[in-house]
Amino acid sequence: MKQAGRPRSKYKWVIAGFFVLSICTTAALIKGKLQADEQTYDVIATVDGIPITLPEFSRAAQRNKSGILNYFHEKYGAEQTSGFWTTAYGGEVPLDALKKKALDDSVRIKVRQWIAMDQGILKHIGYPEFLKQLQQENARRAKAVANRQVIYGPVRYNENTYFEYIMTNATTAVKQKMQLDDESKPDERALKAFYELHKDELYQTPGVVKVVSMSISFLDSDRNADPSKKVQAKKQLEEAYAELESGATFSDIAKIYSDQEAQQELVFHLGNSRHNSRSPVARAAEKMRTGETSGIIEENGSLYLMKCTEKTEPGSMYAPYPEIEEQVLKDYIDSEYEVWVRKKMDQAHVEVNESLYRSWTAHE
């Protein structure tokens, strides 16, 4: 969405290119009903005549508050004081930035809703109808709970969570239709071209390390740590390490010392930092080089000794196309959907109620 300076009473984008006729025709059919439905709510802007109500704009602003706060804090060291929203920092005013972002997002959301309605997925995209659907859905859920029926999700939606639920499902349905449509569904050549174009950003391998391990538990029969067993386990693994240094194979030594009487193969994905951070064994494996033997590692009542058999550094390879073809298709459709939304935003005619826009204020 293009904007020059402050909002004007007519906030326009260039109307040209793809889908222009479809946008104008469909918008003309629905805007009259939407305008009639939303007379009870102040309209802060319209998109091809389709209203954006003040509650919808305020909801978009609320979603963006934290982002604006973080931006001004990181760039200017600004804190959220009582006058934060109206104070100028380096020529930028937080309230102006928030309103612009909220308007941009509101237009984008309305375009996404329009696409879903044009595709027959949403029947209504007006705010009053949304509130009516929310009320009906909560009543249905309350009745189901009273009748001891199974429901999925919350017992009662609030406005924000229900809106996200509706939009997520609608967007997913649009993308599913795109995959089935002969005009938008890509062929093999298009998918491979997309893979090659985006493989650096999307399809680099996160990295993996493979190890073989032997372990000895120091827990007693009640699953409690036994200090004497721990001392003995450590002594045994020190002996195992010495034999490995003398040239013995890991598999042979594991048969002698490991509780499992055999080496265990473990694989750790280097991109899974949250999982790996909770495991001393995984953290040690991340730092190992191919062919290297670890020191003794303690985890969950056992002592471990490992040898790294293979390691692929993050970003050093790409996931092979045949193995991720379905993911490439999903990414391709996601990308085409975003292009569709941007084109419709560029084609849209947006008018802003300037007096209402200027008077809107963020609550501290």
Image (cartoon, rainbow, N blue to C red):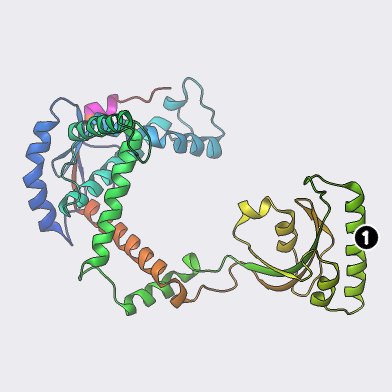
Q: Quadrant of residue 5?
A: top left
Q: Position of residue 218 (x, y in %)?
A: 84, 52
Residue, disc 1? 235
Q: Is residue 4 visible?
A: no
> Front-most of 11 and 193?
193
Q: Is residue 281 above or below residue 122?
A: below
> Front-most of 11 and 47?
47
Left or right of 361: which side holds 348? left
Left or right of 119: which side holds 95? right
Q: Residue at x 39, y 69 (%)?
A: 326
Left or right of 49: which side holds 289? right
Circle 1 Cα neighbour tier, 10 Å, few/some/many (<14 / 14–19 / ≥20): few
Q: Is residue 133 above or below residue 275?
A: above
Q: Residue at x 58, y 65 (%)?
A: 206
> Front-most of 105 and 38?
38
Asked if the magenta segment contains residue 272, the reply would be: no
Left or right of 26: which side holds 55? right
Q: Position of residue 40 (x, y in %)?
A: 15, 25
Q: Quadrant of residue 160?
A: top left
Which secondary structure, mark 1?
Answer: helix
Q: Residue at x 84, y 60 (%)?
A: 296
Question: What is the span of residues highlighted in magenta in the rendered image?
Answer: 355-359
Q: Position of residue 343 (x, y in %)?
A: 24, 57
